[in-house]
Amino acid sequence: MSIKRIFHDPIHKEIVFDSRKPEELMIMELIDTVAFQRLRRIKQLGAASLLFHGAESSRFTHSIGVFCIARKIFKNLVEAKSSFCENKFVLYGAALLHDLGHGPLSHTSEAIFDHNHEEWSRNLVQNYSPINSILKKYDNELPNKIGELFESKQIFSKPLKTLISSEIDCDRLDYLLRDSYNTGTKYGLVDLERIISALTFSPDGNIAIKPKGVIAIEHFLVLRNLMYRTIYNHRINEISTWILGKIIDTIKHNYEKNIWLDESLYKWIFASAKVDFDDFIRNDDITFYYHLIRWKDESFEPLSTLCKMFIDRDLLKASDISFLSKLKRLEILAFARKLCESKNYDSGTFCGIKERSFSGFEANNALQIWDGTLQNSLENSSSLIKALIKPKESAFIIYPSVIKNEIQNQISIIKNT
C-alpha cells in the first residue's frame, strides 16, 4: 500500500515523500526514529532567538529542507549523467542525517562542551542500531558510506562530498534561505533554482558549475558573508555563548558545592568520552534549559547570576574593538577588569575579549567552472569571490552593563591616542 507524507515547509512549500519509492521510504523510516525526532528539540540558530525573536526553527526542519534540496539537485544531475543514479541512497541519507549529532543549541555546544557534531553524526549513523538497521536494509554498506561523508579526512566520492560538505552544499543552500526567513532579514534570498540548474559534471568526475551560474554563486557567497556578519557572529550571539561557556566553566571548577545535575548532562560536562547514545539523546534544548532554570534558582554565585542573565535576557554588554591593535585591546581589557572588581563582579567571569575570524570563501573545497571545454576555479574567474577569501576578523570586549559608559569612553580615548 502506498503512503504519501507531506511536510508543509515555509521555504520549499510542499515536500512530499512517497513510500512506493524505496529511497523515500528509507527517509520516512529515518525521520520516525527517536534520534531524528530529537532534532525538533534543537534550535537551528541556538541562542539567536534572544536577538531575532522569530529564530525558533529547529534542526529537524532544516534537515528536511536539506534533503529536499539534495533531491532536486540529484534529479538535475542524473539527467546530465545517468550513472550518478547509483548515489541516490547515500546522498539522500547523508542530506537528511548530516546534523543528527548536534548538541543543545546547535553550534553553541561546540563552544561550551567538548563536542563535535560531525563526529557524533558519523557515530550515530554507523553505530546506533535504530539508524544503522534502517540503512542496512537498503544497502549493507550504507552506514559506512554516509558516515565517511561526515569525516574531514580522505573521502571516497568527490561529487557526494561536494553536495554534503563544501562551500556551496545542500546544507548551506537551505540554512541561508531558512535563517533569513526566520530572522526576518533579507540577506539570504538565494537564487536556488538558478544554482541547481547550473550544476554539471567536470571531466575529473566532480560536480562543477556552468558559466551561467557564476553570478548566482557570487550572490550566494556574498549573502553568506552578510549573514555571518549580521546574524551568526552578531555581538548578542557572542555574548550569549560567552555566558553559557562561563556557566559550564563555573560548574567544572565548583562541583564540590553540590550542584544539581542529571547523570547524562554530568557526562557531557565532566566525561564526554563516556557519553553513550542514551546520554546523547537525552540532552537537548529542553533538558539544558531546565538545568539553567534550576541553577538560576538554587545555586551559588556567580552561577546563579550567569543563569539569570541568560534565562531572563539580562545580558552582559559588548563593544566592538576590532579596529584596535592587539596591545590596545589588552589595555581596554585591563581597564574593564579593574572596573569590574570595583563593582564587585569577578572580572575573570564577567569580563573578557571574544575574538573571531571568518573567511567568506575557502578555495580548497569549492566548485570548479566547466564550460564544456575549459575548467577553471571560481576565484580565478571572479574578483568578487577572490575578495571573499580574505578572512574577516572581529573582536568584542564583554563586560557588565553597570560599567558601559566608562568602557565606551575609554575605547574612544584609546582609539584617539
Image: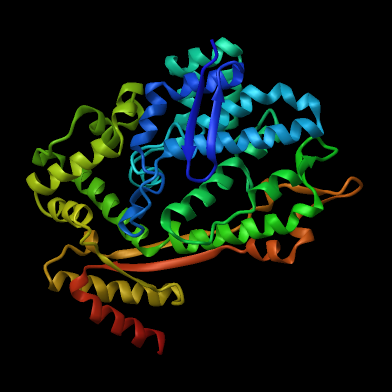
Q: Which residue is located at x 21 percent, y 68 percent?
A: 400
Q: Which residue is located at x 68 percent, y 55 percent?
A: 217
Q: Residue furthest bottom?
A: 417
Q: Is residue 388 left or right of residue 6?
A: right
Where is residue 297 shown, x and y percent of the image?
A: 9, 47
Q: Which residue is located at x 37 percent, y 64 percent?
A: 235
Classify residue 262 by image quadrant: top left
Query: Which residue is at the front of the view, 252 or 183?
Result: 183
Where is residue 82 shown, x and y percent of the image?
A: 80, 26
Where is residue 154 shown, x and y percent of the image?
A: 65, 32
Where is residue 172 shown, x and y percent of the image?
A: 56, 46
Q: Can residue 164 be seen in this view?
A: no
Q: In this view, does 323 lie to the left or right of 284?
A: right
On-image quarter of the C terminus: bottom left
Query: Which residue is at the front of the view, 360 or 29?
Result: 29
Classify residue 313 by image quadrant: bottom left
Q: In this view, does 215 lie above or below 1?
A: below
Q: In this view, does 289 lie above or below 361?
A: above
Q: Is residue 318 visible?
A: yes
Q: Is residue 9 left or right of residue 259?
A: right
Q: Which residue is located at x 46 percent, y 19 percent?
A: 131
Q: Is residue 313 above or below residue 32?
A: below
